[in-house]
């Protein structure tokens, strides 16, 4: 079983910064792509940023230039640095990881429990 535990959410004023962390634990061979998604009330979950196992990032257009995703493979952790936050960034942020196991040989998607980010105007 694999667990993803997020931390770092909270309340911040517009223009402020937050850093989210997501640590993976459990039995697995490798973490492939990892990413952050968010879901605002009444809206669908959307991709914010993702990063490959080799560290290549990609971002949703609405966060480009403000957010930065990174990972520490030694710690099985992915981060999301969020700068210049806007009220429209308010949402529950979820960590996602594509987890590769050898017994059985397969890749599955796992999700964290979510962390609330609230940006006040």
Image: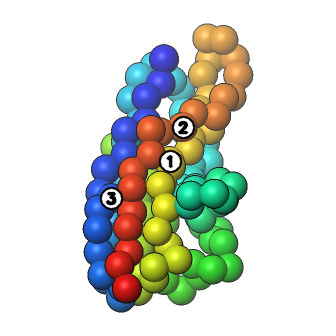
Location of mark 2 (residue): 111
Comes first in the chain, label 3 or label 2: 3
Mark 2 and mark 1 in contact? Answer it, CB < 8 Å.
yes
- Mark 3 vs mark 2: in front: 3
Disc 3/disc 1 C-alpha distance (Å): 12 Å
> Which quadrant: the C terminus?
bottom left
Residue farthest to the front, as pictured: 42
Which residue shows up at 43% across the image and 29% down it? 3
Instruction: Determine the secondary structure under disc 2.
Output: strand
Which residue shows up at 29% across the image and 74% down it? 12
Q: How crowded is mark 2: few (under 14 residues within 10 Å), some or many (20 or more)?
A: many
Instruction: Determine the secondary structure under disc 1.
Output: strand
Q: Residue 59 carries which label?
A: none
Location of mark 3 (residue): 9
Q: Residues within 10 Å of mark 1 (few under 14, many from 20)?
A: many
Comes first in the chain, label 3 or label 1: 3
Residue 82 picture quarter: bottom left
């Amino acid at each position: 079983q694999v667990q993803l535990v997020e931390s770092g959410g909270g309340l911040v004023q517009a223009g402020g910064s937050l850093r989210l962390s997501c640590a993976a634990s459990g039995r697995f061979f490798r973490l492939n792509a990892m990413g952050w998604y968010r879901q605002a009330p009444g809206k669908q979950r959307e991709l914010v940023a993702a990063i490959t196992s080799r560290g290549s990032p990609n971002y949703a257009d609405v966060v480009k230039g403000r957010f930065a995703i990174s990972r520490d493979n030694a710690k099985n952790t992915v981060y999301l640095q969020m700068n210049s936050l806007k009220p429209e960034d308010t949402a529950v942020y979820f960590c996602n990881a594509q987890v590769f196991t050898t017994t059985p040989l397969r890749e599955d998607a796992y999700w964290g429990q979510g962390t609330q980010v609230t940006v006040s105007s």
